[in-house]
Image (tube, rainbow, N blue to C red):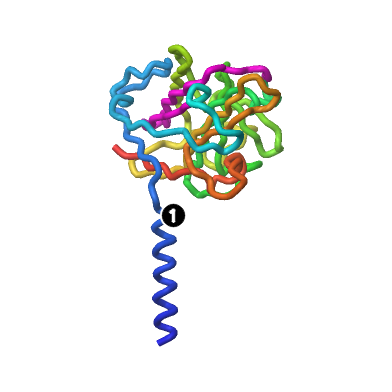
């Protein structure tokens, strides 16, 4: 009897755990027409996509809505994941150029885990953390622990209305076999594909260091600045027709 009860308890625990692991955080629908990367959300795909919030404070003190608000939409085609981010920022700050302290500028950051495997990606390409700065340069850390440009992975344009900036982004998706020293090919996307995904914003107004880091997913625990190391903090994205 004790064995049966123990077995039933294990099945219940496993079932609950498995359900949690399979939770879908984001759905992206396929675009039926070409998306022009111009910072203008004129395509039908954007009209149909759902807005999602960027509102989880990962670093920094509480902020006002005038200082920052963010939301985003997703779409895809066979060759790209598309992100439309609408960011209200009272000061678009850029002091550090190139790979020097890019995270202390105002940065749109997009996290991609091609196979939704989670796990460590600090100095490997199990996942990517694309930091996109005001000049459209894109940075991530490579296997030698140094930062490099990844501009050929990401195409971005931005438009402005008052203090609101619309970032339109097309991302080629690479798997964990990526090696910057050889020729690489992005994977093809298809309906039903699952990926790890999160989007965030590094906000800095006038400080030496970034003042806030705000993301799209809740990160459990006290250390919420783990996305650049742990792909397990990402949300689960599913591509659909």
The residue that appears at 47% across and 34% down in the rendered structure is 55
Query: Which secondary structure lies at badge 1?
Result: helix
In-front residue for pair 87/61: 61
Query: Does any portion of residue 76 appear in the rendered image?
Result: no
Residue at the location (31% across, 28% down)? 31
Image quarter where the C terminus lies is top left
Q: Quadrant of the N terminus?
A: bottom left
Residue 79 is situated, as x and y percent measured from the top left of the image, at: 41, 30
Residue 172 position within the rendered picture, expressed as x and y whole percent measured from the top left: 47, 30
Q: Image quarter for residue 80?
A: top left
Q: Find disc 1 in the rendering and name its residue.
A: 21
Write the residue at 70% across / 24% down.
208
Tell me if 103 is positioned left or right of 38 in this view: right
Q: Please state the extent of the stretch shown in magenta in the rendering.
A: 69-97
Q: Indicate whether 227 appears above or below 150.
A: below
Where's residue 108, x and y in %? Answer: 53, 27
């Amino acid at each position: 009897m004790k064995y049966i009860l123990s077995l039933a308890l294990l099945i219940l625990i496993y079932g609950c755990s498995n359900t949690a692991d399979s939770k879908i955080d984001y759905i992206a629908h396929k675009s039926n027409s070409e998306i022009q990367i111009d910072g203008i959300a004129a395509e039908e795909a954007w009209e149909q996509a759902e807005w999602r919030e960027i509102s989880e404070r990962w670093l920094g003190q509480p902020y006002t809505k005038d200082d920052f608000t963010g939301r985003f939409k997703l779409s895809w085609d066979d060759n790209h994941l598309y992100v439309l981010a609408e960011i209200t920022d009272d000061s678009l700050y850029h002091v550090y150029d190139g790979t020097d302290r890019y995270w202390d500028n105002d940065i749109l950051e997009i996290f991609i885990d091609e196979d939704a495997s989670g796990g460590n990606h600090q100095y490997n390409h199990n996942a990517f953390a694309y930091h996109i700065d005001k000049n459209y340069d894109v940075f991530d850390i490579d296997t030698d622990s140094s930062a490099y440009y990844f501009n050929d992975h990401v195409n971005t344009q931005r438009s402005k209305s008052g203090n609101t900036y619309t970032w339109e982004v097309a991302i080629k998706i690479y798997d964990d076999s990526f090696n910057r020293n050889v020729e690489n090919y992005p994977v093809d996307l298809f309906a039903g594909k699952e990926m790890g995904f999160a989007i965030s914003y590094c906000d800095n107004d006038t400080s030496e260091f970034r003042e806030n880091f705000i993301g799209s997913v809740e990160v459990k625990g006290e250390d919420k600045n783990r996305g650049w190391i742990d792909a397990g903090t990402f949300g689960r994205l599913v591509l659909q027709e």
